[in-house]
Image (cartoon, helix red, strand yellow):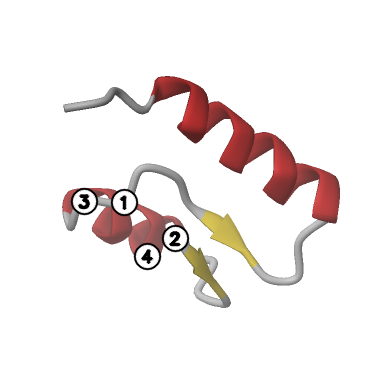
Amino acid sequence: MLTAMEKPSDELRGFAHGADAYLTKPHEPTELLRTVTTLLGQATLG
């Protein structure tokens, strides 16, 4: 999830609704790349 909502309660709500990651704007491009790379590494086929 990429959002401008940055309260801890917003993050908890995001994860409760199925987010695999939670990044707030503005963000560093390297942070986004690292998060996407990690999530792709966790993805399974099938």
**x, y percent for residue 1:** 44, 60
Q: CA distance from mark 1 to mark 4?
A: 11 Å
Mark 1 or 4: the one toward you? 1
Point 83% across, 55% down: residue: 28
Q: Residues within 10 Å of mark 3 (few under 14, many from 20)?
A: few
**x, y percent for residue 36:** 58, 42
Query: Which of disc 4 and disc 1 is earlier in sequence?
Result: 4
Q: Amino acid at mark 3?
A: Gly
**x, y percent for residue 26:** 75, 70
Q: Is residue 21 positioned above or below 1 on the image?
A: above
Kindly identify which residue carries mark 3.
Answer: 18
Which dot marks residue 10?
A: 4
Q: CA distance from mark 3 to mark 4?
A: 13 Å
Quarter of the image with the C terminus in it: top left
Q: Amino acid at mark 4?
A: Asp
Left or right of 2 on screen, residue 24: right
Residue at the bottom extreme of this rendering:
4
Kindly identify which residue carries mark 2.
Answer: 1
Which of 16 and 40 lies nearest the eye of the viewer? Answer: 40
Which dot marks residue 19?
A: 1
Q: Are marks 3 and 1 in contact (CB under 8 Å)?
A: yes
Point 44% across, 45% down: residue: 21
Q: Are marks 3 and 4 in contact (CB under 8 Å)?
A: no
Which of the 4 image quadrants contains residue 17?
Answer: bottom left
Q: CA distance from mark 2 to mark 4?
A: 11 Å
Query: Which of disc 2 and disc 3 is earlier in sequence?
Result: 2
Which of 41 and 30 lies nearest the eye of the viewer? Answer: 41
Query: Which of disc 4 and disc 2 is earlier in sequence?
Result: 2
